[in-house]
Image (tube, rainbow, N blue to C red):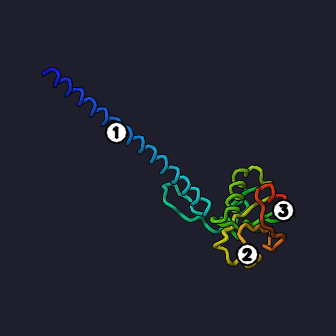
Amino acid sequence: MNQKLIIGIIAIIIVAGVGILASNSSKTEMVRNDAAVQKVGSAMDQAKVTSGIVPSENNAMMKKDDSAMVAKSDMMIEVGSYESYDASKVAMASATHDVVLFFKASWCPACVALDKDIKANLSAIPKSLTILETNYDNSADLKRKYGVTLQHTLVQVDAGGNLIKKWSGSPTLASLVSEVK
């Protein structure tokens, strides 16, 4: 009889132990999921800020005043940066600041490689250069304007959006920078 009692107690301990482990495992998974949600939320907040939508005090979303965006256009662009294309950013070009459009496609291995190299070396972008990431697949008007027929094409423009130089094939940020006039 004692042997049956001991076996029963051991079985209860084993079942309880497995239950505790499963509970801890699900809590760990919940913590991981929560961290992933926070990362996605943070990325979404960043995307909203860069698109002109900002969270208000009570976390409701509101659109920035367009006049404020125009008035602060110089502050929207960091010098020596890699940013998404916006027509207003072309105006940053000047005698002392270069702007290059990078016509990039997500399905293009050479584009992906250059994009990764630029992102890995952001601090190496000269302060006098802004590279504007331009979606090759969704920019028919820009491709027509600059005669772009291949993805992985780079176009240096002036403040009026006029072509200064066009080239393809820069595999690295360093080679892109070396092409800028």
Residue 180 location in percent, x, y?
Answer: 84, 62
- Which quarter of the picture shows residue 171? bottom right
Residue ID for mark 3:
180
Residue type, label 2 = Thr
**Residue 176 picture location, percent across and down:** 80, 60
* Disc 3 residue type (three-letter): Val
Left or right of 33 on screen, residue 52: right
Residue 89 coordinates in the image, percent (x, y): 72, 66
For the N terminus, the image quarter is top left
* Residues marked 1 and 2 touching at CB (< 8 Å): no
Residue at the extreme top: 2
Q: Which of the 4 quarters of the picture holds residue 25?
A: top left
Task: Report, in whole angstroms, how far the alpha carbon at label 3 lies from the one at label 2.
Answer: 20 Å
Q: Is residue 158 left or right of residue 89?
A: right
| Mark 3 or mark 1, earlier in chain | 1
Q: CA distance from mark 3 to mark 1?
A: 59 Å
Residue at (31% x, 35% y) in the render: 18
Name the spot of residue 114 as percent of width and height, x first: 72, 58
Frontmost of labels 1 and 2 is 2
Q: Which mark is residue 149?
A: 2
Q: Quadrant of residue 65?
A: bottom right
Quick check: marks 3 and 1 in contact, CB under 8 Å? no
